Amino acid sequence: MYFKFLEICYTLIGEIMSNFTFAIKTAIVFFPIVALFFTIFYVLYQYHKYGSVNGFRTIIIYSFILYLLTAYFLIILPLPSIEYVNKINIPSYNLQPFNFILEIINKTNLKFNDFTTYFPTLKNAATYEAIFNIFLTIPFGIYLHYYFKCSLGKTLFFSFCLSLFFELTQISGLYFIYPHSYRVFDVDDLILNSFGGFLGYFLGSLFIKILQSRDKIDHDSYQKGELVSIFKRFCYISIDLFIIILLTFLESYLVYNKIISKEYLIIPLIMYFIFVLIFKKSIGMKYLNLEFKNFKNLSLKRFNLLIYYLTFILIYIILPIFSLFLGYLLYQNQIFNYNILEYYIVIILALYLMILILSLLLKIFHKNLIYESISGIKIVSTIKIKDEEF
């Protein structure tokens, strides 16, 4: 009896995993594309809220995204052809609750008072489908309880919402791409998926005991967020540049339609510097909780800020671009040949890379950057460690 039970469990797991395999492979293919777009917003949000990007949190979040992709592909794949969907004629929905129990009983010889009918019932396709729908949302319940700290009621609600989204995807014919549904909207799936989230909630308690708690992850993030890394600086500068470029595109549109003259294209950059000089922080710094701080016993004057930005632009933008442009002009005037130009560009790029590496090393050893030393100010984080128990 024991070995028979193990054999059925092995068969059941194998059947479920065979359904997962194709969806997992598809999700892995699409995951880098989704992650690429998600990462930008994820990093900026983490810097905004915690001041740092926690590695363990990142693993949890990205594994959660991979799970959702896998679950989604499980309910839509394999995709049939439109010609096939036009030919099939299946019921669009089943609104009778617990109909899956009747199907299992009808398709098997299950008798609740006869234990010998239990094992054959477990090997039936209808049983596989019911168990599959439960297993589908167990990870969802685990994530909700362990990381998102949802209560049992919220876990049940969000599990139901996820299941409803899946069922609406199916009944709409994949958002009306197909002429009609190629899978059945089943109220039993809503019940079983919600039950899966319910089980996942209690399994999440086990993960809380084994892994770092959410409060511990947050505490470590706040602690690390007090430091201002090179990458965090790059993020705030990227936000500012994006705003400047966006405003410039808007003005280019106005210039193109002859609403304003082209001389106004410099206004976004001027507005940016005026904003910084008035509020003593840029929009990117404000979002990432950064501020300027004096560290040479000098009063923080707007003149210092101006020197700071002019020095930064000179070292990281003007000098490299001017060097490359100078090399191009020399080549156009045939002062030196093509081979010399190649070496010239390589040397300039190498010098630029050395500047970036030097900046990184200075920050690693907590030294002041060149433009910070010249201007007499530096950037600090306003993120503070919150007193939370973990």
Image (cartoon, grey):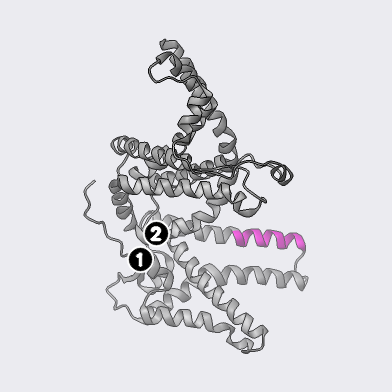
Q: Which residues are magenta?
A: 338-349
Mark 1: give few (<14), some (14-19) or many (20+) Cα within 10 Å: many
| Secondary structure found at label 1 | loop
Dominant SS of magenta comes to helix
First along the sequence among labels 1 and 2: 2
Residue type highlighted by circle 2: Tyr
Residue under the image location 60 percent in, 35 percent down: 22
Do the numbered discs 1 and 2 sit on residues whose CB atoms are within 8 Å? yes
Q: Quadrant of residue 93?
A: top right
* Mark 1 lies on residue: 289
The residues bearing labels 1 and 2 have C-alpha atoms spaced at a distance of 8 Å
In front: 140, or 86?
86
In the image, is residue 268 above or below residue 101? Answer: below
| Secondary structure found at label 2 | helix
Q: Quadrant of residue 203?
A: top left
Whether residue 297 appears in this view of the structure is yes
Mark 2: give few (<14), some (14-19) or many (20+) Cα within 10 Å: many
Whether residue 131 appears in this view of the structure is no
